[in-house]
Amino acid sequence: MFITLGVRKAKAVKASAVNRQQVALNNRVWPEAVVKVSNNIANQFETPVLFYVLCLVFYSINAADIVAIGLAWLFALSRFAHAYVHIGSNYVPMRLRLFLLGCFVLIAMLILAAWKLASV
């Protein structure tokens, strides 16, 4: 995403689509294509934080079995798909479905981690 953001910002600057003084103080002045990627990067620091913690929990209690790994991959794939839609068509109903899929996977991982912790 950071590479995509850099490419899109460079294209906008090269095409004189932005006022450099304005974008220094206001990220929303960038063209829509840049704002989509910027928003997606911010979004990547929300629910994935819980995912990282859960992965560390599974690893630390030696419980990274096939179910945990499968759920982790499903979450990662849901995030990739969400990012693809977010910076592409930005079709909100599809983004919501993909976001909810990721959330449900995180809930399943949380339940699995709690179960594994209780049986340690």
Image (cartoon, helix red, strand yellow):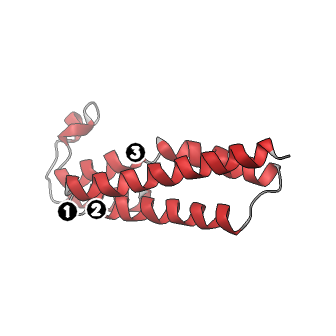
Residue at the disc numbered 3: 43
| Amino acid on which disc 1 is placed | Ser
- Residue at the spot x=86%, y=46% of the render? 120
- Marking on residue 50: none
Question: Residue 30's spot in the image, x, y percent?
Answer: 20, 45
- Residue at the spot x=57%, y=42% of the render? 50
Front in this rendered view, residue 114 or 29: 114
Cα separation between marks 3 and 1 = 16 Å
Do the residues bearing badges 2 and 1 touch, measured as CB atoms within 8 Å? yes
Looking at the image, residue 110 lies above or below residue 24: below
Task: Describe the element under mark 3 as helix, strand or loop.
Answer: helix
Q: Residues within 10 Å of mark 2 (few under 14, many from 20)?
A: some
Question: Residue 62's spot in the image, x, y percent?
Answer: 83, 56
Name the N-terminal-most of marks 3 and 1.
3
Q: Residue furthest right?
A: 120
Looking at the image, residue 70 lies above or below residue 82: below
Cα separation between marks 2 and 3 = 13 Å
Residue at the disc numbered 2: 85
- Marking on residue 89: 1
Determine if residue 45 is in view: no
Task: Describe the element under mark 2 as helix, strand or loop.
Answer: helix
| Amino acid on which disc 2 is placed | Val
Cα separation between marks 2 and 1 = 6 Å
